[in-house]
């Protein structure tokens, strides 16, 4: 298939996804797809992702399509530059397929908090696809595109990957440039990858990874080794943290995890129980650190230079109030308020200071487990399968707890991924692998081995 | 009642880099509005800062020049506030862990002699943009050329005891920073800006009084004037039994008064936190050593050396050191073989463009050797352009000293004939008139007579006949 043929085919599938009511795309056009195809054809030689369409979460800036972050405040905003990851995809021969819907500024776990409407789960429109990268997850799961970029701050790729039954990989913090990823929680944000197979996810990750002079937090590390074939886990020790298997864990989720662990043992892995004692601190810690950083990161959306400016009489303060009040949705406003509060004089130590200390403890749990000889950790990605739309929107804390198993690795900056390991009542269950910093290759190899022996579309009992 | 004034200064200097602190935009001055901008300094979504290594180097240089202890690890922090000249809604600065702490700067106080003023901290930060109120009628425009320009903020301890000392501190600080090549420190261009903190207390008290802050003092003279006005105002308040309120003030150069700014500005909670976009700034011992070795000789050391190596007095050495190019010129002239004392006199007394060091050295040599008179040299000096040798100029202007006996004899005889009264008084014992008569010979020769030869000849003629 030529790049132009791919462009036409992708356009048809995106139109189909639209007709099906997924509401997963925020921007795409046949013209833009053809322009992407021309770009591929202009490359001197085919790259590693030659003519592959990649959907891009709409908080990653692109010059070819608008970038709204799912927010009214950036309605129609067109970036004058491409994110580093977009540049790298282009250089590898990939095509930007579309921009995908998300929780506004990536704040949410269900993709219900988009100013442009909620994303439907591809298998059950009454359910959520997870979030915040729900649009990317739903598009990959629906088959519209083979791969997509999302972003993680506290599990926003692994959790929707789990809900939608696709592979979602978050690299080590600093492995992939954040230049062009609209900042939410800068110390946590990671551009991450969705694909239908571990191999595809690894290919995309290898293309976008690597130090970037435009992001001072990227790591000068050796590149991620290509995925080795050969499905064995012999010599690999898999740690199973007991804190991730609480008594009230969904029975289907538990059954799928047990089955996956059994298959890993058959593949030669040694399974050991470990403890990550500070795991319960992760969600509260996350919901202090991420909002604090977000409050500063979102201060630039003031209507003065770009984006939506509310008509306002009076002084500049009135302009800010009107623009930000009307431009941000409720969840974003809530987090800005929380973030502002926890950094305020007199509260900083009690909240932000404590959260930083807790973050170090959480990271310490992981280092201890890995230092004790564990190569990888295995956990359920989420406590439940995809929940119903509207089920948690009235109760932010219950929504936040959907991320209880994905937050810790984000706080520790570790690579982690979700892969489909079976079904519970027809809905996908994801299993999570967490690796030491920079050990993506090890994690992906184990995931590929597991993938090769699992029937992830089958019901687990 | 006697009062003691306590002043500390917060000085912002623009680090003399070509590009901005966190992006590659030009740090040039005077370009059309919003031409030196990019996604980073505009705060566009997705843009990230990357520290300018040269700016860090210059800040370290400043810290070393001010005897600061440079921290191996310092941390960039976000200072959060909303203002239209601040594109990101926060300024990247340093807060809890500044680049350098605990420095000092020696100043000469008229009241207290040599004073070591402590430097509490030196940190790196980015500048904000500029609001233009005069471009579009009824509206405010924003120029972000300055947004992201690298600055060092240098905070002194409350160690200054008078507005004059504050001025002396700023003068010494400017001198040292210009010497070290950190900044051009131009108040006109805004590359040197100063805020003053001032309080007064009863003489002998140790606790500090309530301070006020005077913002953006735009010249050395206005710094002193504003602090004087505020000192007087505070003393008056206290003498009336009132209390000084902690406020931020603006100085009006037109009226010479200080006025409170709208107090809303004062109650900011900046919610500082470490900037997650920037890893800690590490200045290792090797880097520190290297930057230290690049540091030129600083004014105080240079002054001491000019005194000891060239035998200059404190005043002359001080004047020469005041500007590094002058001191460098002085040494170049000496290297060309000039007598240091004469070289210093020439350089201190002559203003304007200096000739080539070799030319001045030769001129000094011609005077010392009696080839031209000092008076003639003063006429030769301004002609020393285009690489002309002083001797050539002297010849061209007819200023070579005449020692020829016949010529001298001619002028001497004329002078004796023209001044019979003085001649008679000299012969009657009023010998100090010899100098007057020699002067007359010099005048008659239009400065070309060799003064010693003329005087000898004159004495002989007066005795002889």
Image: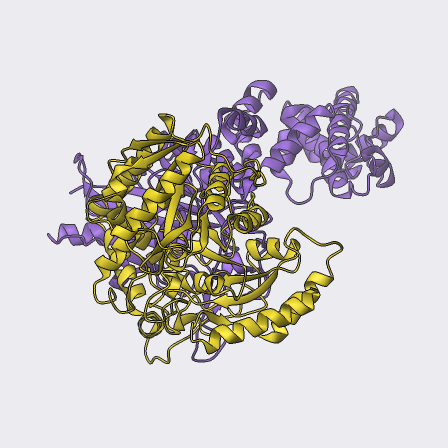
Chain colours: A yellow, B purple
- Left or right? Give the position of A276 relative to A28: left
Where in the figure is residue A129, as x and y percent of width and height? 37, 63
Where in the figure is residue A107, as x and y percent of width and height? 34, 60
Residue in the foreground of this view, choosing between B289 and B106? B289
Q: Is residue A239 above or below residue B310?
A: below
Position of the C terminus of chain B, as image quadrant, is: top right
Where in the figure is residue B23, as x and y percent of width and height? 55, 51
Position of the N terminus of chain B, as image quadrant, is: top left
- Left or right? Give the position of A428 relative to B269: right
Where in the figure is residue B406, as x and y percent of width and height? 89, 27
Residue in the foreground of this view, choosing between B35 and A111? A111
**Residue at screen point 47% across, 78% down:** A19
- Does the rendering let one see residue A153? no
**Residue at screen point 16% across, 36% down:** B205
Residue in the foreground of this view, choosing between B246 and A255? A255
Q: Is residue B69 above or below residue A70?
A: above
- Left or right? Give the position of A387 relative to B244: right
**Residue at screen point 22% across, 58% down:** A398
- Does the rendering let one see residue A404? yes
Residue in the foreground of this view, choosing between B421 and A351? A351
Q: Is residue B412 above or below residue B259?
A: above
Res B305 → quadrant? top right
- Left or right? Give the position of A332 relative to A341: right
Number of disc labels? 0
């Amino acid at each position: 298939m030529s790049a132009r043929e791919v462009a036409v085919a992708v356009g048809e599938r995106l139109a189909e996804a639209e007709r099906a009511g997924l509401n997963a795309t925020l921007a795409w056009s046949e013209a833009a797809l053809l322009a992407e195809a021309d770009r591929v054809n202009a490359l001197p030689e085919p790259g590693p992702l030659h003519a592959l369409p990649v959907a891009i979460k709409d908080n990653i800036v692109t010059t070819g399509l608008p970038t709204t972050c799912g927010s009214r405040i950036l309605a129609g905003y067109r970036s004058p530059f491409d994110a580093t990851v977009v540049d790298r995809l282009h250089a590898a021969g990939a095509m930007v397929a579309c921009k995908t819907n998300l929780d506004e500024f990536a704040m949410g776990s269900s993709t219900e908090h988009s100013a442009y409407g909620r994303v439907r789960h591809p298998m059950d429109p009454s359910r959520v696809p997870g979030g915040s990268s729900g649009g990317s997850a739903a598009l990959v799961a629906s088959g519209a595109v083979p791969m997509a970029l999302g972003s993680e701050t506290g599990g926003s790729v692994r959790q929707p990957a789990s809900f939608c039954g696709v592979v979602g990989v978050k690299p080590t913090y600093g492995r992939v440039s954040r230049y062009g990823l609209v900042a939410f929680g800068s110390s946590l944000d990671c551009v991450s990858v969705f694909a239908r197979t571990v191999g595809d996810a690894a290919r995309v990750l290898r293309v976008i990874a690597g130090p970037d002079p435009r992001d001072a937090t990227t790591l000068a590390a050796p590149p991620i080794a290509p995925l080795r074939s050969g499905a064995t886990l012999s010599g690999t020790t898999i740690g199973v943290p007991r804190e991730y298997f609480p008594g009230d864990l969904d029975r289907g989720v538990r059954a799928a995890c047990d089955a996956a662990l059994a298959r890993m043992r058959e593949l030669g892995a040694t399974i050991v129980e470990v403890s990550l004692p500070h795991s319960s601190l992760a969600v509260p810690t996350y919901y202090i650190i991420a909002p604090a950083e977000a409050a500063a990161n979102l201060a630039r959306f003031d209507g003065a230079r770009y984006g939506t400016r509310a008509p306002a009489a009076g002084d500049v303060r009135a302009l800010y109030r009107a623009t930000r009040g009307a431009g941000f949705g409720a969840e974003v406003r809530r987090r800005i308020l929380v973030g502002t509060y926890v950094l305020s004089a007199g509260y900083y130590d009690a909240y932000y200071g404590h959260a930083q200390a807790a973050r170090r403890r959480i990271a310490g749990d992981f280092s201890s487990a890995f230092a004790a000889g564990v190569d990888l950790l295995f956990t359920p990605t989420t406590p439940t399968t995809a929940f119903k739309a509207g089920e948690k929107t009235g109760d932010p804390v219950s929504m936040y707890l959907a991320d209880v198993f994905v937050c810790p690795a984000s706080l520790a900056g570790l690579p982690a991924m979700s892969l489909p390991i079976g079904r519970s009542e027809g809905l996908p269950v994801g299993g999570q692998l967490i690796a030491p910093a920079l050990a993506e290759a090890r994690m992906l190899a184990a995931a590929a081995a597991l993938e090769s022996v699992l029937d992830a579309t089958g019901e687990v009992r | 009642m006697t009062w003691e004034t306590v002043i500390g200064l917060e000085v912002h200097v623009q680090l003399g880099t070509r590009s901005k602190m966190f992006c590659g935009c030009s740090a040039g001055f005077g370009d059309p509005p919003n031409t030196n901008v990019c996604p980073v300094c505009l705060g566009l979504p997705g843009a990230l800062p990357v520290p300018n290594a040269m700016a860090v180097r210059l800040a370290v240089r400043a810290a070393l020049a001010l005897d600061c202890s440079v921290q191996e690890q310092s941390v960039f922090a976000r200072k959060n506030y909303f203002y239209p000249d601040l594109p990101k809604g926060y300024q990247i600065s340093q807060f809890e862990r500044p680049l350098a702490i605990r420095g000092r700067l020696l100043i000469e106080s008229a009241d207290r002699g040599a004073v070591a003023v402590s430097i509490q901290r030196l940190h790196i930060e980015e500048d904000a943009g500029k609001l233009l109120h005069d471009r579009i009628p009824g509206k405010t425009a924003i120029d972000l050329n300055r947004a992201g320009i690298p600055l060092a903020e240098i905070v002194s301890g409350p160690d200054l005891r008078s507005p004059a000392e504050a001025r002396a501190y700023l003068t010494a600080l400017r001198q040292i920073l210009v010497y070290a090549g950190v900044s051009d420190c131009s108040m006109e261009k805004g590359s040197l800006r100063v805020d003053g903190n001032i309080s007064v207390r009863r003489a002998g008290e140790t606790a500090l009084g309530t301070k006020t802050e005077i913002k953006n003092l735009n010249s050395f003279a206005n710094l002193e004037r504003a602090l004087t006005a505020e000192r007087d105002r505070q003393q008056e308040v206290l003498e009336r039994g009132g209390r000084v309120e902690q406020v931020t003030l603006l100085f009006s150069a037109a009226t010479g008064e200080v006025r409170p700014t709208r107090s809303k500005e004062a109650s900011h909670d900046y919610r500082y936190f470490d900037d997650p976009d920037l890893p800690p700034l590490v200045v290792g011992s090797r880097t520190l050593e290297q930057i230290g070795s690049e540091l030129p000789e600083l004014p105080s050391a240079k002054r001491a050396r000019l005194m000891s190596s060239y035998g200059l007095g404190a005043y002359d050495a001080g004047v020469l050191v005041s500007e590094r190019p002058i001191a460098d010129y002085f040494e170049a002239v000496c290297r060309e073989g000039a007598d240091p004392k004469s070289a210093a006199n020439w350089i201190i007394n002559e203003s304007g463009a200096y000739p080539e060091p070799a030319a001045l050295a030769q001129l000094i040599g011609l005077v010392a050797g009696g080839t031209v008179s000092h008076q003639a040299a003063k006429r030769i000096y301004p002609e020393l352009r285009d690489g002309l040798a002083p001797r050539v100029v002297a010849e061209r202007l007819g200023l070579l000293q005449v020692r020829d006996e016949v010529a001298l004899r001619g002028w001497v005889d004329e002078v004796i004939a023209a001044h019979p009264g003085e001649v008679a008084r000299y012969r009657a014992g009023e010998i100090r008139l010899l100098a007057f008569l020699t002067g007359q010979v010099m005048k008659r020769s239009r400065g070309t007579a060799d003064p010693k030869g003329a005087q000898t000849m004159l004495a002989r003629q007066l005795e002889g006949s």
